[in-house]
Amino acid sequence: MASPPHLEFERDIVELQEEIDKLLEKADRKKIDVSRELEELQGRLRVLREETYRNLSPMEQVRVARHPQRPYTLDYVERIFTDWIELHGDRTYRDDAAVVAGWARLNSQSVMVIGHQKGRDMKENLRRNFGMPHPEGYRKALRLMQMAEKFGRPVITLIDTPGAYPGVGAEERGQAEAIARNLREMARLRVPLVSAVIGEGGSGGALALGVTDRILMLSNSVYSVISPEGCAAILWRSADHRDQAAQALKLTSSDLHRLGVADEVVPEPTGGAHSDWDEVARMLKEALHRNLEELRGHSVEELLEGRWAKYERIGAWEEGRES
């Protein structure tokens, strides 16, 4: 994996890491012992990284969630699952590369894995449409969810999209209908469903894979009805207010867990998921396995009742009184 580009708030971390690299280079060149100095600098780096990532603003968390070196669905598939067999096509129009799906095993359990997929370079991003699915992507996902239901297998979805593609062709082929159908059918699917927001969960394009019994979020992921830039453009007529919008949207994992939308926050390594793919995959695997094991103890009727109750609670509101 290539060394990740750095975010603006990581400047002090980068400078300290460069100081450590220079010290190691000097020690190697002059054959001297720098263990004491190295230990001190590494300790400072560890503390600085922890403090920086513990105090991120909502907009800074959005930037981490969008980091170009953050692991995507297929990176997690490689590290978490075995016996992956990718399946293609919606049997209506074409295969949408912005959604990947297939059979796999989580430990010894057969599961259907479905997720948004972005690209690592311009060529792949064009093929995968920057992780923004067309309606055929959602129809592929639904077809394979129903296949999993037929064989009594759980479904795991990995959410990471700025939103569904809003182009003319997508709208002509029924983008809104495809998303709405997924919401309806997932609500009554008769197998355990677990979703994990691994990056950016944007609008209905994310929700179309997110009507599940359990919603997990990586600690630096975000989940929202609209992007901070889009919200700022609507409310303030300027994207310059994106920090204010991100604060108001309550889109961070901690906010959504407190509000009862997310069932569990899966911690990321200090420095974000992009700093250690293997470690974040290990923690996500444990959380997925544990939640599926808990859901396997419920009957179909209990699953459906619990799912409906979960989303009814999310939709509840109270009218405030003027003081």
Image (cartoon, grey):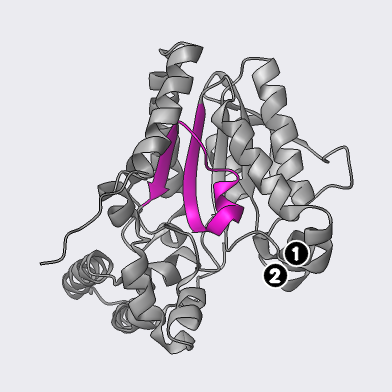
At 38% across and 41% down in the image, what residue appears? 283
Q: Is residue 256 magenta?
A: no
Q: Residue flagged by tag 1: what amino acid is it? A: Glu
Q: Position of residue 139 (x, y in %)?
A: 75, 41
Question: Toward which corner of the image does residue 117 lie, by quadrant?
Answer: bottom right
Judging from the image, what secondary structure is the residue with disc 1 in?
helix
| Residue 63 found in image quarter | bottom left
**Is 247 placed left or right of 286 in the picture?**
left
Furthest toward the front, the residue is: 322
Q: Which residue is mark 2?
A: 121
The amino acid beneath tag 2 is Asp
Residue located beneath label 1 in the image = 124
Residue at 58% x, 63% y is 162
The span picked out in magenta is 193-218
Relative image position of residue 84 (x, y in whole percent): 68, 33
Q: Is residue 125 left or right of residue 11?
A: right
The C terminus lies in quadrant: bottom left
Is the residue under label 2 in contact with that under label 1 (CB below 8 Å)?
Answer: yes
Can residue 262 be spotted in the picture? no
Image location of residue 260, percent across then percent down? 31, 43
Query: Vertically, is 322 above or below 308?
Result: below
Q: Which of 193 and 34 lies nearest the eye of the viewer?
A: 193
**Residue 192 spot, x, y in % from top left:** 51, 23
Q: Does residue 63 appear left or right of residue 58 in this picture?
A: right
Q: Residues within 10 Å of mark 1 (few under 14, many from 20)?
A: few
